[in-house]
Image (cartoon, rainbow, N blue to C red):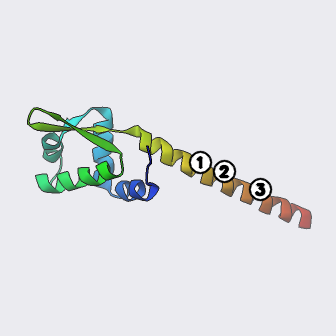
């Protein structure tokens, strides 16, 4: 899986998409079910789902006439590792600054 972190962060920048993701991680839902949960058109919900799908945060499968949206946590795990790496880097830098300040005293 090659995840584009920019696409993931873009997808997660919107509160509606974050809410959709939380819903479908708990249990897969049809696009129609999702659309009933929001004060927006079916087409608008479809667009939100498409953004999540491009970021590989959700996948869709066909069940009869419905498309079932399911959460894909693999992309979140990859981005979490990326953020962990940034956190480690900044903690190292902060520790280095702290050492320099202690040496100056």
Q: Which residue is drawn at 13% across and 45% down?
A: 36
Q: Residues within 10 Å of mark 2 (few under 14, many from 20)?
A: few
Quadrant in the picture for residue 27: top left
Q: Quadrant of the N terminus?
A: top left
Q: Distance between the residues labelled 1 and 2?
A: 6 Å
Q: Residues within 10 Å of mark 3 (few under 14, many from 20)?
A: few
Evaluate if marks 1 and 2 touch, with contact meaning CB atoms under 8 Å apart.
yes
Indicate the position of residue 42 as horizontal and vertical percent values.
12, 52
Give the residue pinned by disc 1: 84
Q: How crowded is mark 1: few (under 14 residues within 10 Å), some or many (20 or more)?
A: few
Is 10 placed left or right of 48 in the picture? Answer: right
Is 50 placed left or right of 65 in the picture? Answer: right
* Vertical position of residue 12 compared to residue 23: above or below: below
Indicate the position of residue 51 as horizontal and vertical percent values.
29, 54
Which numbered mark, 2 or 3, is in the foreground of this view?
A: 2
Q: Which of marks 3 and 1 is nearer the N terminus?
A: 1
Q: Which mark is residue 46?
A: none
Is 95 placed left or right of 18 in the picture? Answer: right
Give the residue pinned by disc 3: 95
* Vertical position of residue 73 compared to residue 92: above or below: above
Quadrant in the picture for residue 9: bottom left
Q: Quadrant of the C terminus?
A: bottom right
Residue reaching furthest to the front = 2
Q: Distance between the residues labelled 3 and 1?
A: 16 Å
Residue 105 seen: no
Secondary element at tag 2: helix
Evaluate if marks 2 and 3 touch, with contact meaning CB atoms under 8 Å apart.
no
Quadrant in the picture for residue 47: bottom left
Q: Residue 88 carries which label?
A: 2
Indicate the position of residue 88 as horizontal and vertical percent values.
66, 50
Q: Of 52 and 94, which appears nearest the observer?
A: 52
């Amino acid at each position: 899986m090659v995840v584009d972190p920019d696409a993931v962060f873009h997808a997660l920048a919107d509160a509606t998409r974050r809410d959709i993701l939380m819903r479908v991680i708990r249990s897969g839902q049809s696009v129609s079910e999702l659309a009933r949960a929001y004060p927006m058109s079916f087409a608008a919900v479809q667009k939100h789902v498409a953004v999540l799908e491009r970021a590989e945060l959700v996948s869709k499968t066909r069940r009869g006439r419905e498309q079932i949206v399911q959460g894909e946590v693999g992309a979140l795990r990859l981005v979490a590792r990326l953020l962990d790496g940034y956190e480690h880097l900044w903690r190292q830098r902060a520790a280095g600054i702290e050492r320099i300040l202690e040496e100056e005293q």
